[in-house]
Amino acid sequence: MSGSAPLVDAFNRRITYLRLSVTDRCDLRCTYCMPERMQFLPRSEVLSLEELHRMALGFIARGITRIRLTGGEPLVRRDVIELVRALGRRIGDGLEELTLTTNGTQLAQHADDLAAAGIRRINVSLDTRDPALFERLARRDRLGAVLEGIAAAKAAGLRVKINTVALKGLNEAELPDLIAWAHGQGHDITLIEVMPLGDVDEDRVDHYLPLGAVRDALERRWTLSASSHKTGGPARYLDIAETGGRLGLITPLTNNFCDGCNRIRVTTTGQLYACLGGSERVDLRAALRSDDPDGQLSDALDLAMRIKPERHHFRIDQRGATPAQPRTMSVTGG
Ligand code: SAM
Ligand code: SF4
């Protein structure tokens, strides 16, 4: 057992950031994320609140300083606020930051509770402000609720970062307006290249948009300059002089960022995936349910450090190609 030794992988990367999926379920069905008839896990397989909490404490004991709760849609899990409160008590005591990634549909109900529990900033996914396109992309007519959620988060004092998957021929033309809107509201915004994770009903190749092309188009309109801003995630940031805001770019396909990876992900069933794009995993649920949960968990984390791969190998250039991994992002935890 390695007690409180920090987590360092075989490539000498210090792992300090945990993305913890609290549910694989979701109230939307974004076309690039999951099929309409998504098969969710039976509830019996999902970790209990106590298990999630104990596991998170085990990570903090091993030097994880930032935890992002995600899913699926974290706010559809009924007891998630209890977990947020319990982990919020560790902020300043091992944990530097607790954050959340949400689709925003339930944010209006929860924003005050999140802020009261110690969350300071959240990511909200929003691919379009056009109601018809939203319904086409999310397969649900919920744009109004998301916009209300974003406004409620701002009113609760939460810093909001908008996450937008850039999609050729879908939200491509709207991206400048979406960026200008986000900056006008005081929110940062990050664009993401669509990744080949899990089978969905459409072929992602059709709407894959490399962000280099988006940046070139934006440069014809605005003055962009590299920003030194860092959040601990994979985004690289640009300042836009005219909007006065910051634009993040996450480029898993066109500009690999694995050298600086500081992350691991745990699914809602307690499977630790050492890489979003890899199959290397360790079963933390078995460790948690053993007769020495804390010791076994710590040993499992050491194993995860030995098997974490150097990088992902995403490709998205061939129609009908098999995804890099069979798991959708909603399963691994986005
Ligand atoms: N449901 C929450 C949400 O949508 O924010 C949290 C989980 S979701 C899986 C996290 C992020 O992953 C979202 O911003 C979503 O747009 C993104 N995402 C999902 N599938 C993706 C894919 N195949 N490629 C790139 N981003 C993806
Ligand atoms: Fe749900 Fe988020 Fe996936 Fe959309 S991206 S289907 S909101 S988990």
Image (cartoon, rainbow, N blue to C red):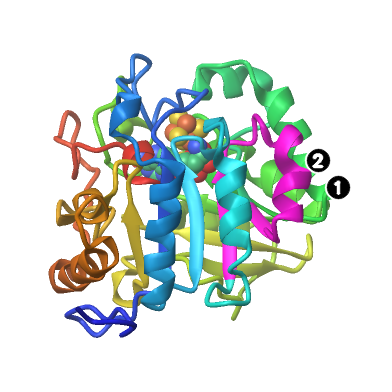
> Going 78% across and 32% down the picture, which residue do you hit?
148
Residue 273, disc: none
Is residue 187 visible in the rendered structure shown here? no
Q: What residue type is disc 2 on? A: Ala
Q: Secondary structure at mark 1?
A: helix
Quarter-wise, where is residue 294 in the image? bottom left
> Going 65% across and 21% down the picture, which residue do you hit?
142
Is 59 a magenta residue?
A: no
> Going 58% across and 77% down the picture, which residue do you hit?
93
Above or below residue 32? Residue 265 is: below
> Going 66% across and 31% down the picture, which residue do you hit?
106
- Measured as percent of width and height from the top left, residue 254 is found at 33, 59
Question: For mark 1, what is the residue?
Answer: 155
Q: Nearer the viewer, residue 160 or 48?
A: 48
Q: Nearer the viewer, residue 246 or 124?
A: 124
Question: For mark 2, what is the residue?
Answer: 151
Distance from disc 1 to disc 2, alpha carbons, whole Å, reads 6 Å
- Measured as percent of width and height from the top left, residue 121 is found at 67, 58
Quarter-wise, where is residue 76 in the image? top right
Q: Nearer the viewer, residue 178 or 302?
A: 302
Q: Secondary structure at mark 2?
A: helix
Q: Is residue 271 left or right of residue 97?
A: left
How would you rate the neighbour count of disc 2 (Cα within 10 Å): few for under 14, some for 14-19, many for 20 or more?
Answer: some
Beta carbon at label 2 within 8 Å of ligand 1: no
Q: What residue type is disc 1 on? A: Ala
Above or below residue 312? Residue 197 is: above
Beta carbon at label 1 within 8 Å of ligand 1: no
Is residue 285 visible in the rendered structure shown here? yes
Residue contact between numbered discs 1 and 2, judged by CB atoms under 8 Å: yes
User: What residue range appears in magenta?
Assistant: 97-122
Above or below residue 124? Residue 88 is: below
- Measured as percent of width and height from the top left, residue 220 is found at 63, 57
